Amino acid sequence: MYPIEASQGSADSKPRRSLASEAGHFLQFGLSGLPAFVVALGLNKFLVEFAGWPKPVAYLLVVWMQMNIGFLMCHLVAQISTSAVLLLVKFMSAKAIFRSRAG
């Protein structure tokens, strides 16, 4: 076999990021989800302890809220179009099917 040269698209032809850069991206990713995590804990505690909701129902609402807010932040930019609404319905349906089979 002939060795693969860098010009032919081997893995070595890509620039490698340093460990510090990778750690920075990982930290940034983790911190970006922190506000949603804190809100979810507070909302879940409120619904269960103060509003008297059953834990599974409160958890369902909090997870549904997180999924949909995350979807909206990623996919809907300036205006809502028909295709964006259809995409949201497909996303919610897929998550509902996955959650119902995982539980």
Image (cartoon, helix red, strand yellow):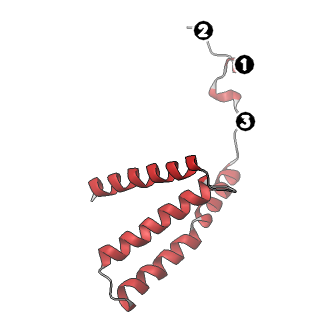
Gap between marks 2 and 1 measured at Cα? 14 Å
Nearer-the-camera pick, 14 or 20: 14
Place of residue 58 in the rendered image (x, y in percent of width and height, measured from the top left): 36, 76
Three-letter code for the amino acid on which mark 3 is drawn: Pro
Nearer-the-camera pick, 19 or 84: 84
**Label 3 crowd bin: few (<14), some (14–19), many (20+), radius 10 Å:** few
Q: Which residue is at 36% across, 84% downward? A: 48
Q: Earlier in the sequence, mark 2 or mark 1?
A: 2
Residue 23 sits in quarter:
bottom right
Give the structural element (helix, strand or loop) at label 3: loop
**Quadrant (top left, top right, bottom left, bottom right) of the N terminus:** top right
Residue 32 sits in quarter:
bottom right
Q: Is residue 13 left or right of residue 47?
A: right
Q: Are marks 3 and 1 in contact (CB under 8 Å)?
A: no
Q: Which residue is mark 3?
A: 15
Q: Is residue 20 left or right of residue 92?
A: right
Q: Which residue is at 70% across, 57% downward? A: 78
Q: Which residue is mark 1?
A: 7
Three-letter code for the amino acid on which mark 1 is drawn: Ser
Three-letter code for the amino acid on which mark 2 is drawn: Tyr
Gap between marks 3 and 1 measured at Cα? 13 Å
Q: Which of the two marks, 2 or 3, is nearer to us in this view?
A: 3
Residue at the outermost front position: 82
Give the structural element (helix, strand or loop) at label 2: loop
Nearer-the-camera pick, 102 or 78: 78
Gap between marks 2 and 3 measured at Cα? 23 Å
In the rendered view, tell whether residue 9 sits above or below residue 70: above
Q: Which residue is mark 2?
A: 2
Residue at the outermost bottom position: 50
**Quadrant (top left, top right, bottom left, bottom right) of the C terminus:** bottom left
Place of residue 49 in the rendered image (x, y in percent of width and height, measured from the top left): 36, 89
Place of residue 25 in the rendered image (x, y in percent of width and height, measured from the top left): 66, 55
